[in-house]
Image (tube, rainbow, N blue to C red):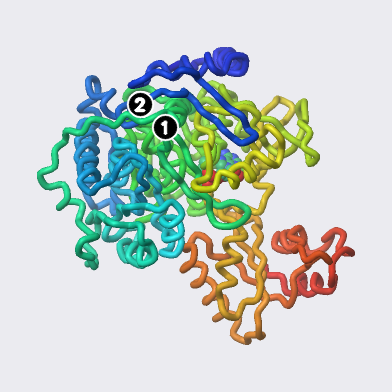
């Protein structure tokens, strides 16, 4: 695998990847362990879509994450695990220990009857067993579907049902900051409606008492008694499914994004090494939760494939105080630190008193992911955390892309605040106008599409290939559509401007407005609702909900509370609206379509210049909405 070291080399590699993509990726894939080599590097069309990388090859990603490294790295730390409470002891896990743990747990899964191709749901806090769970599934070719442990029972049930999971891996409880969360209880509630689940394995973390259903539920540590560490990796096809990860779109229920083994593996390692410029012996820390794609690719797979040492953190940036991240950076002498703009803004707001006590002199590279980073936050991060000597890699990508697509290479690409800069080798972005025409040249803006497949591109949406085609490949012929707006400046640098569909990005979490609306509409007093995003100082975007009630309720505050509870129950606390305005009508066109443009403007605080409202069925509703707009 080529490690790029200079800008010139980046340019040469980029050209190679465009002129001869197959040759380029075959070269990157050479250094992996393949049981059977590919007969063809790439076979694809974006119309169906049907995309295959390393056709007919066989491998196992865990053999490349673990077995491959043992001769040189058995005693090297794979993970430093830092608990939620700094008073609790950290755990150090070497590559040998991780290998043994994964093999043992693989044998537990086998004992329970889990086979290649089966779906296993993982609903766990950020404890080492979570990483073990993913890898054990992958080792036998079972497909993992990790659900972020902040989602509600209802949301979890929907995800388990959608892909018919046979098993759920979970914990008794979770620590998150000062909170103690009853995880197993959520699972119990969820699987009451999931007949496909035959087994639940519960890892003890908080010692919270739990109800164990005989014949279905067992404890993790009990399962491990007398289990062997001998577990050769299953040979799986390059295009066999590795995992499903649910994400929100502009319509309907969250969709199960499917990634396959071979291409994802090659791309995860390639991007990890090149974007972060990881050097042997360094400590990498990605603060994401493994419940999101960032955690899959840059806590578990990318770093392990590269034989890196990483930090895995159970807690939150604000507990016990807002200096926690910086304390952890000093404690493990973290060299590469990767976080989200929301965290940066929240810690900036907390003040420099929380930063000053820490040296932060081990830091060499800083990263940002998940949402556009505003220039102010970028400058603060650069000055106060990076001390103006650490390159910042603003990495743009998505659940569907599997790995980073547009980003500086640390220390190689000249950065510019707010810009994800240039595409990685193998990535061919184009900007498209409303008519679907590709916009050439620089100093332009349009919808961001990618015109050629990269190895970790989404293969399908689980159980509904047509939905995948519709969502990503039907808007513009022969292009993958990202759903993001983007500007390409005079230097050819890319700046992502945000979603152009009905998806909002709250604290780096993707939330579909339609999903929030249907949760709000479950409240008995609500007839209809419309949800839009608005700029929020810390979260990037906040959620603004307009609701119409059956009967006017005098106790609006109580109503708001009930709606927040409803959304928490149906989706989870991350989707709670920040503002709820009760209205008597929504601005609709004569054909019944809600004019969201107007609602967005009002939510943004733009109460005049609302544009043309003459096509509205009842323009008077707009005046009423403006009059009642929330600050
Ligand atoms: O809008 C873009 C934004 O996050 C979306 C993808 O969300 P998700 O699938 O949850 O994955 C997040 C982590 C990869 C994108 O469509 N986004 C992600 N990274 C950036 C970003 N927006 C601007 N700049 C980024 N660096």
Q: Is residue 293 visible?
A: yes
**Taking 132 as reference, is 558 above or below it?**
below
Horizontally, residue 145 falls left or right of residue 590, namely: left
Residue 372 in sight here = no
Residue to which mark 2 is pinned = 59
Is 75 displayed left or right of 141 in the figure? left
Question: Which one is nearer the viewer's eye here, 60 or 500?
Answer: 60
Which of the marked residues, 2 or 1, is nearer the chain's N terminus? Answer: 2
Q: Are marks 2 and 1 in contact (CB under 8 Å)?
A: yes
The residue lying toward the viewer, choosing from 204 and 611, is: 204
Ligand 1 is located in which of the four quadrants? top right
Q: Residue 54 at what x, y percent from top left?
A: 46, 23
Q: Specify whether 70 is left or right of 56.
A: left
User: Which residue is labeled 1 in the image?
Assistant: 261
Q: Position of residue 516 (x, y in %)?
A: 58, 63
Q: Nearer the viewer, residue 425 or 260?
A: 260
Quadrant of the rendered image containing residue 488: top right
In terms of image quadrants, where is residue 588? bottom right
Say which residue appears at 37% left-offset and 49% top-offset: 324
Q: Is residue 79 above or below residue 201?
A: above
Quarter placement of the C terminus: bottom right
Report the side of 215 relative to 169 (left or right).
left
């Amino acid at each position: 695998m080529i490690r790029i070291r200079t800008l010139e080399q980046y340019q040469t590699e980029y050209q190679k990847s465009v002129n001869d993509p197959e040759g380029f990726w075959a070269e990157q894939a050479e250094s992996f362990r393949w049981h059977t080599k590919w007969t063809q590097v790439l076979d694809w069309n974006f119309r169906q879509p049907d995309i295959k990388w390393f056709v007919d090859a066989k491998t196992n990603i865990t053999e490349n994450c673990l077995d491959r490294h043992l001769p040189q790295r058995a005693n090297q730390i794979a993970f430093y695990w830092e608990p939620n409470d700094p008073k609790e002891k950290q755990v150090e896990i070497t590559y040998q220990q991780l290998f043994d743990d994964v093999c043992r747990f693989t044998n537990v899964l086998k004992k329970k009857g889990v086979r290649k191709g089966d779906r296993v749901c993982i609903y766990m806090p950020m404890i080492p067993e979570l990483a073990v769970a993913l890898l054990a599934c992958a080792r036998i070719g079972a497909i993992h579907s990790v659900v972020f442990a902040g989602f509600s029972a209802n949301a979890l049930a929907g995800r388990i049902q959608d892909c018919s999971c046979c098993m759920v891996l979970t914990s008794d409880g979770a620590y998150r900051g000062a909170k103690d969360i009853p995880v197993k209880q959520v699972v119990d509630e969820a699987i009451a409606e999931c007949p496909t689940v035959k087994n639940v394995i519960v890892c003890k973390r908080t010692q919270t008492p739990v109800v164990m259903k005989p014949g279905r539920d067992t404890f993790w540590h009990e399962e491990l008694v007398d289990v062997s560490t001998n577990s050769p990796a299953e040979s799986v096809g390059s295009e066999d499914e590795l995992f499903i990860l649910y994400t929100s779109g502009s319509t309907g229920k969250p969709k199960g994004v499917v990634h396959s083994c071979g291409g994802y593996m090659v791309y995860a390692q390639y991007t990890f090494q090149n974007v972060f410029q990881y050097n042997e012996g360094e400590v990498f820390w990605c603060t994401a939760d493994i419940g999101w794609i960032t955690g899959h690719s840059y806590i578990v797979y990318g770093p392990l494939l590269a034989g890196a040492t990483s930090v895995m953190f159970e807690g939150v940036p604000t507990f016990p105080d807002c200096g926690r991240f910086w304390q952890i950076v000093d404690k493990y002498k973290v060299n590469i630190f990767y976080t989200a703009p929301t965290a940066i803004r929240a810690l900036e707001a907390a003040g420099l008193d929380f930063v000053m006590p820490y040296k932060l002199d081990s830091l060499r590279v800083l990263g940002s992911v998940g949402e556009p980073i505003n220039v102010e936050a970028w400058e603060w991060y650069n000055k106060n955390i990076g001390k103006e000597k650490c390159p910042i890699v603003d990495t743009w990508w998505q659940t569907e892309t599997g790995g980073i697509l547009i980003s500086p290479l640390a220390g190689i690409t000249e950065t510019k605040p707010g810009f994800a800069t240039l595409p990685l080798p193998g990535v061919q972005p184009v900007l498209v106008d409303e008519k679907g025409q590709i916009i050439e040249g620089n100093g332009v803006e349009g919808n961001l599409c990618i015109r050629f497949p990269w190895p970790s591109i989404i293969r399908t949406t689980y159980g509904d290939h047509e939905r995948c085609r519709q969502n990503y490949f039907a808007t513009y012929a022969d292009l993958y559509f990202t759903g993001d707006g983007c500007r390409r400046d005079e230097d050819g640098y890319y700046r992502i401007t945000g979603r152009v569909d009905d998806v909002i990005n709250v604290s780096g979490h993707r939330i579909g407005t339609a999903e929030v609306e249907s949760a709000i509409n479950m409240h008995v007093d609500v007839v209809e609702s419309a949800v839009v995003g608005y700029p929020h100082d810390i979260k990037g975007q906040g959620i603004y909900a307009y609701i119409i009630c059956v009967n006017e309720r005098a106790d609006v505050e109580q109503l708001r509370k009930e709606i927040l509870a409803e959304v928490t129950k149906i989706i989870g606390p991350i989707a709670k609206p920040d503002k709820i305005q009760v209205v008597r009508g929504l601005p609709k066109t004569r054909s019944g379509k809600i004019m969201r443009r107007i609602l967005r403007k009002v939510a943004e605080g733009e109460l005049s210049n609302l544009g043309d409202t003459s096509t509205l069925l009842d323009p008077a509703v707009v005046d009423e909405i403006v009059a009642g707009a929330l600050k």
